[in-house]
């Protein structure tokens, strides 16, 4: 299975944009890129996912490199409530594909 | 219910005892996942059910662990002869289809003493 590489931790100031990188150089053509986050003492929650094109939703934007070997999750204005561990996950197309979490990036947001 | 429900929320058991953890997924969701998370660690995949297909059990750490999903709805994770290293938060998630967002429950905190 293709693997993802994320920085262990990042810091951001409140109200600033945050760009969380993810490298996936061995991604295959059928791998979807999913992002989840886990707030302290809670279960993970879905953020966004995409295949080839950039995606936007109410929570974030996902920018996917043209060669798909990397992607960036963009939080447009970080708040204290965005402090969490952010997981970048590759998921193959098909019903047999499970959702496997790596170690993620711990985002700290400060005033 | 509005979301994924897990019970009990907390379970303390003695080493060597069997435990059953229950997950009620969101109604109509075909995919169901179990994970465990030890203190300060990431999520460890355990098992994945998708519709009527055979479950993916590749993450179960030993034959003491088993899970079933009855009628495509409720799932039970059973741990036999519990050990102290089984102490963790056990999380269940469900999704409408394999490729749609997964919704997680609040987890069951298992403590083996």
Image (cartoon, coloured by chain):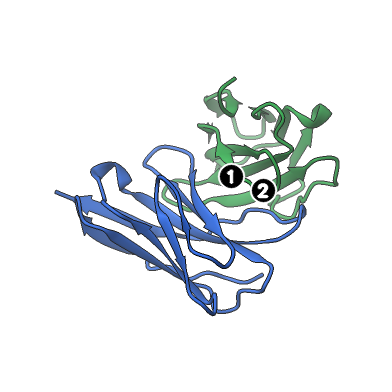
Chain colours: A blue, B green
- Looking at the rendering, which quadrant does residue B24 occupy? top right
Choose between A53 and B28: the one closer to the eye: A53
At horizontal 52% and vertical 25% (from top left) the residue drawn is: B9
Any mark on residue A83, and which? none
Q: Is residue A4 above or below residue A46?
A: below
At horizontal 63% and vertical 53% (from top left) the residue drawn is: A99
Chain letter of the residue beneath label 2 in the structure image: B
| Residue B12 located left or right of residue A73 | right
Q: Label 2: state its secondary structure.
A: strand
Name the spot of residue A31 as percent of width and height, x first.
64, 66
The reply to whether residue A34 is visible in this rendering is no
| Residue A48 located left or right of residue B96 | left
Label 2 packing within 10 angstroms: few (<14), some (14-19), many (20+): many
At horizontal 26% and vertical 50% (from top left) the residue drawn is: A78
| Quadrant in which the N terminus of chain A is drawn | bottom right
Any mark on residue B101, and which? 1
Q: Which residue is tagged 2?
A: B46
Name the spot of residue A72 as percent of width and height, x first.
42, 66
| Residue B78 located left or right of residue A61 | right
| Label 2 vs label 1, nearer the camera | 1
Name the spot of residue A50 as percent of width and height, x first.
55, 60
Q: Label 1: state its secondary structure.
A: loop
Name the spot of residue B69 as percent of width and height, x first.
78, 33
Chain letter of the residue beneath label 1 in the structure image: B
């Amino acid at each position: 299975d293709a693997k993802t590489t994320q920085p262990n931790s990042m810091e951001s100031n409140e109200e600033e944009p945050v760009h969380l990188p993810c490298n996936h150089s061995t991604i295959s053509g059928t791998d979807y890129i999913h992002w989840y986050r886990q707030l302290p003492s809670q279960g993970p929650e879905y953020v966004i996912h995409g295949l080839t094109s950039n995606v936007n939703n109410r929570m974030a934007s996902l920018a996917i490199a043209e060669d798909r070997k990397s992607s960036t999750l963009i939080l447009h204005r970080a708040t204290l409530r965005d402090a969490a561990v952010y997981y970048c996950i590759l998921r193959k197309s098909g019903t047999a594909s499970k959702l496997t979490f790596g170690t993620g990036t711990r985002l700290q947001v400060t005033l | 219910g509005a979301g994924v429900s897990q019970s009990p929320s907390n379970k303390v058991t003695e080493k060597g005892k069997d435990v059953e953890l229950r997950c009620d997924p969101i109604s109509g969701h075909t995919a169901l996942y179990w994970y465990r998370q030890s203190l300060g660690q990431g999520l460890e995949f355990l098992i994945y059910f998708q519709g009527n297909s055979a479950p993916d059990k590749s993450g179960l750490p030993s034959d003491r662990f088993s899970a079933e999903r009855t009628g495509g709805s409720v799932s039970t994770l059973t741990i036999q002869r519990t050990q102290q290293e089984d102490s963790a938060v056990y999380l269940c998630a469900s999704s409408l289809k394999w490729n749609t967002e997964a919704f997680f429950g609040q987890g069951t905190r298992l403590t083996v003493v």
